[in-house]
Amino acid sequence: MTDTSRKCDGCRKGDALDFSFSMAFQPIVDLHTGSAFAYEALVRGRDGQSAQSVLARVTPANRYAFDQKCRVKAIETAAAAGLLDTPAKLSINFLPNAVYEPKACIQLTLQTAKACNFPTDRLIFEFTENEEMVDPSHVSRIVDCYKKMGFGTALDDFGAGYAGLNLLARFQPDIIKLDMELIRALDASLPKRLIIDAVAKLCAKLGISVIAEGIETDAELNALREIGIRYIQGFLFAKPAFEAIPMVQMSAQDMALSA
């Protein structure tokens, strides 16, 4: 059996995965509307245990099956939790190194979306810089394929991990998510504000939306407003809710500014 055949088998049958898990959801807030632009699906243990308790069990042998089941679980759980009763999109993390052929590896996702009556144009796939990309050209092909199929694409943890601006020179996702370390105490750091401002202006020229994640204080939020960042994610608005769609919590002042 070839290596590709083994990957196909793991994706199709999932028999390489000997543990179960579920999902929590956290909103990505549109400051222009004060509502959720999307909800990110975050892996959790079957009874709500931490993401790390699940990710620690992912190995090279079960990586393909895990990636497939993450997509399926995210769509099924989001649909059951009522996400389709909102206008928000669903953002799903995936492992680029677990996608050997984009069109083949997306088939189970498409089947699941159809079974759940989940419009595929409401799906965003985000990949993280913190996973080393063995072949950036392959990741570029994945992004190109997903865009052509109508999915949104996002680069998570931008500014950390294995690459940064080099990736944007190779391919342009629809969205980048600024790493939370760039956001932390942003209001007290001129270098951070200048860096985020420069990235935002660059992305605007490239037609890429920017999401700032990890917002915990009003001061961080106000600094991002001043820069012109529209999409925000963090505990300031809502913590991840296990198998549920949490309400966006905005202060009266924030609502007034969003109006």
Image (cartoon, helix red, strand yellow):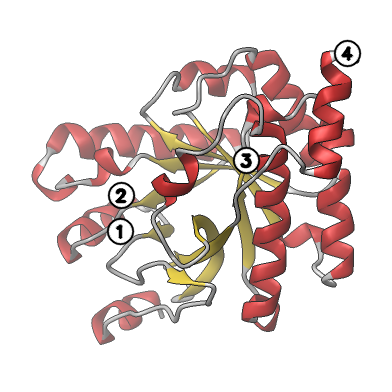
Judge from the rendering whether residue 2 lies leftward or rightward of residue 167; answer left or right. right
Q: Name the residue under label 4.
A: 2
Q: Position of residue 105 (x, y in %)?
A: 82, 37
Q: What residue type is labelled 1?
A: Arg
Q: Name the residue under label 2.
A: 227
Which numbered disc covers residue 28?
A: none
- The span from disc 3 to disc 2 (Cα, nearest Å) is 30 Å
Q: Where is residue 215 in the image (x, y as percent from the top left)?
A: 28, 57
**Quadrant in which the N terminus appears:** top right
Q: Residue at x 73, y 56 (%)?
A: 72
Q: Which of marks 2 and 4 is in front?
A: 4
Q: Which amino acid does label 4 sit on?
A: Thr
Q: What element carries label 2?
A: helix
**Quadrant in which the C terminus appears:** bottom left
Which numbered disc covers residue 225?
A: 1
Which numbered disc covers residue 94?
A: 3
Q: Residue at x 54, y 73 (%)?
A: 243
Residue 94 versus residue 30: which sits nearer the camera? 94
Q: What element carries label 3?
A: loop
- The span from disc 1 to disc 2 (Cα, nearest Å) is 5 Å
